[in-house]
Image (spheres, rainbow, N blue to C red):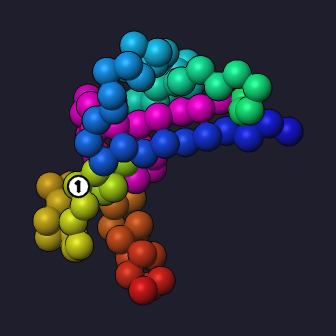
């Protein structure tokens, strides 16, 4: 079984990497990087890859990237604070602290 890598970016990625990104056939908000030899897929999400997918209800991966990139300590600082996935994720994160 080959692993699948997932990278969440807070801001953006270097221009050198941008030219290597390919569309992911499974989800438009994911991009693929070449991953010869080590993984089945190397997927990446950035604020720019999810910007056209911030329609509620958010896909769970879009919600995760959105929350990671926004770096807010509470729901009050999030535009999509009423999204069920965002609310659930924040709730579970607060339980862990």
At horizontal 39% and vertical 59% (from top left) the residue drawn is 85
In this rendering, is residue 93 above or below 45? below
Judged from the image, the secondary structure of the residue bearing numbered disc 1 is: helix
At horizontal 85% and vertical 39% (from top left) the residue drawn is 1
Query: What is the number of callouts on the image?
Result: 1
Residue 63 visible to the viewer: no
Residue 89 vs residue 53: left or right?
A: right
In this rendering, is residue 2 above or below 70? above
Residue 39 vs residue 62: left or right?
A: right
Determine if the magenta segment contains residue 97. Answer: no
Residue 91 coordinates in the image, percent (x, y): 38, 76
Residue 6 placement: quadrant? top right
At horizontal 41% and vertical 37% (from top left) the residue drawn is 45
**19 or 48, which is in the foreground?**
19
Quadrant containing the C terminus in the rendered view: bottom left
Determine if the magenta segment contains residue 48. Answer: yes
Magenta segment boundaries in residue numbering:
41-64
**77 or 10, which is in the foreground?**
10
Which residue, given by chain and number where applicable, does mark 1 sit on? 70
Residue 40 visible to the viewer: yes
In this rendering, is residue 69 above or below 18? below
């Amino acid at each position: 079984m080959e692993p699948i890598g997932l990278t969440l970016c807070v801001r953006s990625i270097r221009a050198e990497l941008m030219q290597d990104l390919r569309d992911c056939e499974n989800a438009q908000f994911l991009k693929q990087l070449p991953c010869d030899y080590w993984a089945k897929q190397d997927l990446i999400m950035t604020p720019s890859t999810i910007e056209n997918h911030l329609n509620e209800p958010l896909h769970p991966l879009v919600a995760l990237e959105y929350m990671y990139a926004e770096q807010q300590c509470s729901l009050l600082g999030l535009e999509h604070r009423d999204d069920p996935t965002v609310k659930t994720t924040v709730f579970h994160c607060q339980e862990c602290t």
